[in-house]
Amino acid sequence: MKTIGSGNRTSKVPWHLVNWNLQDIEISERFECSRERVRQKRKELGVGKPANWHRRRGSSRERIEAIGGTANLTLKDIAEKARCSRSYALQVLKGLKKGYKREDMSGRTKYDWGSADWSKPPKEIAAALGIENPGVVTQYRQRHGIKSSRVTASDKIRKVLKKGEVLTPEMAVKIGGCTLRYAKEVLKKEAEKAERAKVAEGVEQVEESTGTSEVVQEAVVV
């Protein structure tokens, strides 16, 4: 077994396990070494070119594209399924804008929070990131000061209402990107708030009017 350096990383290639019927690029990705090193080893061992050496290769990328829910898989899992290196799998995932389940040095799962759509409810975000407990999403949101989907939706609806526009629940759903039930709740609360403001304004006007009349009466008596 020989050791091959690749930058700061050192990988051991078990050449006796290599399937020389594969293309050099497929071998290099599977064993995480350079294509040039594979070519040299092929020449050193006197192994001829594979039957499909002339075929343009795109199989690893195609296999990654064919994987449905990459968000539920680690980079290692994806690389194994696509039969390529992790670095190549990561490159393809970035190009396809697909997420994946991350792990830290302790082996604990890390999630691709950067791809989360925070306008959606915790359950939907959890499903997209492969998180079993939606509470993990809620905790992350609170820890990083990210507004909840409901707060974001209500802000959007209130912003339109402040402009004096009249909204139906269906219109509010489209604007806030929320459920019909929640849209109705927001509209009801805003209507009640507006009604209270009108009542308060009416009371103030009555008080001002009463105060003025009392001043006039006092002036007449004097």
Image (cartoon, helix red, strand yellow):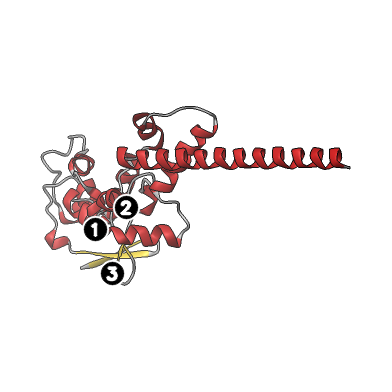
Identified at 23% across, 59% down, the residue is 132
Tell me the quarter of the picture where residue 58 sits.
top left
Give the mark toward the camera: 1 or 2: 2
* Of 97 and 121, the residue lying toward us: 121
* Of 123 and 10, the residue lying toward us: 123
Outermost residue, right direction?
222
User: Position of 216 compared to 206: left or right?
Assistant: right
Give the Cα distance between marks 3 and 2: 24 Å
Residue 179 in percent (x, y) is at: 31, 40
* Residue corresponding to mark 2: 122
Identified at 32% across, 66% down, the residue is 10
The dot on residue 76 is 1
Assess disc 3: are there few (<14), some (14-19) or many (≥20) residues with their C-alpha within 10 Å of its C-alpha: few
Instruction: Say whether disc 3 or disc 1 marks the residue closer to the N-terminus.
Output: 1
User: Position of 47 compared to 161: left or right?
Assistant: left
Give the Cα distance between marks 1 and 2: 26 Å
User: From what the image shows, is residue 124 above or below residue 168?
Assistant: below
